[in-house]
Image (spheres, rainbow, N blue to C red):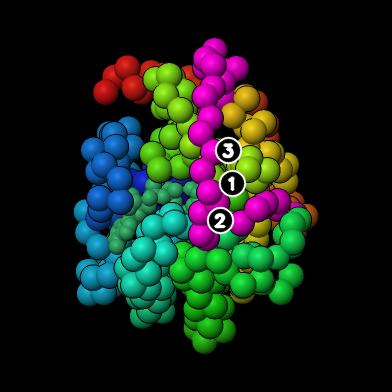
């Protein structure tokens, strides 16, 4: 059994990860400030199941509080940190770039500092496919990164650079995992699959930015959690991995699948392209397959079915 600190553990991906770590018999310390990037009541629901577990401890505080983080690492005997806390969201980062510098860059460095001071030697960083910016898909980890198209993407790239530096300076074994459009139960309410599902099920228009030709590599949250768990077991100094599905889907196909699963007609309103968006993402997952044994299992149709099933129950409850 290990003791693992999960920052952002009340969020979408973090709450799934915490539950899996508990199932695997680990001690989990979740650090989350329940910020209002979306309704904090949603995050309360996310942690409800884990809170019933005796090996789970929730600390409601900020990763930017350096002395608190150092104290937590010391008192909990943490073996590894999975750093998921961040301001996520490409478009919002264009409006409030300095907030992203604080949380996504300074917060990451602050955690790495706390790790080196407390001899924590394993660090997993939630990076993003958006780091590839203007690169041409399929994206490989060894490709020279293109220009990042948003402050969010630039901040994630910067976080990766700091992980590499701390790995070199202090021997922290760091893995940066570039997640590709994650979906599944508890998905953030600002993300496309969830906003589309809500609008379609309520008979409202969905908004598509651009001409409908954009495409994404959608990855089911359980597959992402598999990748994170595998990275925790990896014994290498510094690595970057793509965690995607390696199956790019056009947004119009996605919408069609959603309409079919919801058994509803879809009404689309096309709007001009938004700043910060890239036309397409697609992960080359060869490296993750080779070193992590990563092999995504949930196909989009099946994942959407699971998501819609969860969403209908969830919105009935609330
Ligand atoms: P999320 O917003 O649901 O989770 C992030 C959590 O971090 C939230 O619960 C929030 O309250 C917490 N948090 C934010 N700032 C904090 C701070 N200063 N102190 C403590 N807690 C703080 O987002 P998510 O979709 O679960 O994403 C998790 C991570 O994965 C993020 O780093 C995100 O950038 C990255 N990522 C997500 C996706 C995706 O498709 N969801 C894709 C690429 C990368």
Query: Front-most of 128 and 229?
Result: 128
Query: Front-most of 249 and 46?
Result: 249
Query: Front-most of 165 and 128?
Result: 128
81 displayed left or right of 220: left
Vertical relation: 256 (above or below) 133: above
Total number of numbered discs in the rendering: 3
Q: Residues within 10 Å of mark 3 (few under 14, many from 20)?
A: many
Q: Secondary structure at mark 2?
A: loop
When asked about the image quadrant of residue 201, the answer is top left
Between the residue at mark 3 and the residue at mark 2, the CA separation in whole angstroms equals 21 Å
Residue 220: which disc? 3
User: Is the residue indicated by label 1 positioned so its CB lies within 8 Å of ligand 1?
Assistant: no
| Circle 3/circle 1 CB separation < 8 Å | no
Q: Secondary structure at mark 1?
A: loop
Q: Provide the residue span drawn in magenta.
A: 258-284
281 is within the stretch colored magenta: yes
When asked about the image quadrant of residue 68, the answer is bottom left
| Circle 2/circle 1 CB separation < 8 Å | yes
Residue drawn where x is 65% and y is 53% of the image: 279
Look at mark 1 in the image and give the residue it sits on. Answer: 210
Q: Position of residue 108 (x, y in %)?
A: 40, 71
Residue 277: which disc? 2
């Amino acid at each position: 059994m290990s003791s693992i600190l999960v920052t952002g553990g009340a969020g979408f991906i973090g709450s799934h990860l915490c539950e899996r770590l508990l199932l695997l018999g680990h001690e989990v310390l979740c650090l989350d400030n329940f910020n209002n990037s979306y309704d904090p009541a949603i995050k309360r629901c996310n942690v409800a199941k884990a809170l019933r577990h005796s090996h789970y401890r929730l600390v409601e505080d900020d990763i930017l509080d350096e002395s608190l983080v150092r104290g937590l690492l010391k008192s909990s005997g943490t073996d590894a940190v999975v750093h998921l806390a961040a301001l996520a969201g490409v478009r919002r980062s264009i409006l409030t770039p300095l907030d992203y510098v604080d949380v996504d860059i300074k917060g990451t460095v602050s955690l790495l500092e706390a790790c080196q001071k407390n001899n924590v030697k394993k660090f997993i960083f939630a990076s993003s496919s958006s780091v590839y910016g203007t690169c041409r898909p399929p994206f490989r980890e060894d490709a020279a990164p293109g220009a990042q198209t948003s402050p969010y993407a630039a901040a994630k790239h910067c976080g990766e650079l700091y992980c590499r530096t701390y790995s070199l300076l202090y021997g922290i074994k760091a893995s940066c995992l570039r997640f590709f459009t994650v979906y599944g139960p508890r998905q953030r309410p600002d993300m496309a699959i969830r906003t589309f599902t809500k609008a379609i099920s309520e008979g409202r228009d969905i908004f598509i930015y651009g001409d409908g030709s954009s495409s994404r590599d959608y990855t089911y949250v359980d597959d992402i959690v598999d990748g994170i768990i595998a990275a925790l077991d990896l014994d290498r100094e510094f690595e970057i991995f793509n965690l995607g599905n390696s199956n790019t889907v056009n947004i119009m196909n996605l919408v069609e699948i959603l309409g079919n699963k919801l058994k509803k007609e879809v009404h689309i309103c096309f709007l001009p392209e938004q700043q910060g968006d890239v036309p397409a993402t697609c992960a080359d997952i060869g490296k993750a397959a080779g070193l992590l044994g990563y092999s995504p299992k949930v196909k989009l149709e099946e994942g959407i079915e699971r998501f819609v099933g969860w969403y209908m129950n969830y919105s009935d409850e609330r």
